[in-house]
Amino acid sequence: MVLKKTLQTICLLNVHPNTTTSIVIQVVNDDGALLPCAINAACAALVDAGTPLKHLAEMNPFTLVDGKPYPLDMRGELDDTAAFKNFKNASLKFTVLNPKGRIWTMVAGGGASVIYAYTVFGDLGYASELGNYAEYSGAPNEEEVLQYARVVIDCATADPDGQKRALVVGGGIANFTDVAATFNGIIRAMKEKEAKLKAANMHIYVRRGGPNYQRGLARMRALGDEIGIPIEVYGPEATMTGICKQAIDCITASA
């Protein structure tokens, strides 16, 4: 019942009022925290299917000890994020998983960033090529995104080897983050790092929606023409994780 109510809460039920959506959850193994796993998996399935959602749902595992809730999840802060600790409102996370990976991500939103990483890592089976985990959220301003994007691009373009690489600049549909403002920071970083992007044979895939997203996407398209780097740009009409498949097709075509 909790699972059903949670999913009904996040779905835009008035968009397709005569449509029935069925979600089948198969429990392969239960080591505890079954409900959080079911909610997270079902939410990821709805996103992958392109179901219109108000927002994402995420539940962390917990247990009750003497009637009090205790979280079972752990959050670790690594050295990669040290440069971003002074940002008071924004949340900017970056962890290198494989410095030699050829797929790199710069994703808006905590829930979306997990879904993008899982799509590359699990669904599509390219864990060995995923270079990083990255997430920016909390409505960061242009300067904060600029500093963040510099770090991501420097790592993604290190030690070019002549093979194609892909940078996924993705996210869901923002509620309050100004997409154009955050994209301005990313665009400035890409202009600064033009030579590095070209040397690394980087292909960029963008998908975003939310406040001012049309302006942000238009600037991204113009950037590709300006600096001569392949940039494919999509709005909320495209599925959120579709660009992950395109990124994989890009690097495997050159293998």
Image (spheres, rainbow, N blue to C red):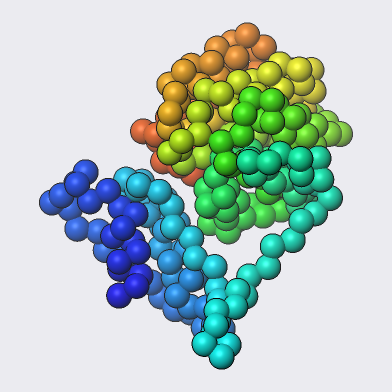
Q: Using the rendered view, name the quadrant where residue 250 is placed.
A: top right
Tell me, yes or no, if residue 242 can be seen here.
Answer: no
Which residue corresponds to the image point at 76% horizontal and 56% vertical from the top-left? 77
Q: Is residue 177 above or below residue 40?
A: above
Q: Which residue is situated farthest in the left direction here? A: 18
Tell me, yes or no, if residue 78 can be seen here.
Answer: yes
Which residue is at the front of the view, 244 or 90? 90
Which residue is at the front of the view, 50 or 187? 187
Q: Is residue 159 above or below residue 191?
A: below
Q: Is residue 85 above or below residue 9?
A: above
Q: Which residue is situated farthest in the right direction here? A: 159
> Could you tell me residue 96's position as x and y percent?
77, 48
> Could you tell me residue 95's position as x and y percent?
75, 49
**Number of callouts:** 0
Q: Is residue 126 left or right of residue 59?
A: right
Which residue corresponds to the image point at 76% horizontal and 44% vertical from the top-left? 85
Which residue corresponds to the image point at 56% horizontal and 36% vertical from the top-left? 139
Q: Is residue 130 left or right of residue 23?
A: right
Q: Using the rendered view, name the quadrant where residue 94 is placed.
A: top right
Which residue is at the front of the view, 248 or 153? 153
> Could you tell me residue 68's position as x and y percent?
55, 83
Which residue corresponds to the image point at 34% horizontal and 54% vertical from the top-left? 10
Q: Using the rendered view, name the quadrant where residue 162 is placed.
A: top right
Where's the C terminus, which quadrant? Answer: top right
Where's the N terminus, which quadrant? Answer: bottom left
Q: Is residue 138 left or right of residue 175?
A: right
> Could you tell me residue 198's position as x and y percent?
75, 20
Q: Which residue is situated farthest in the bottom direction here? A: 66
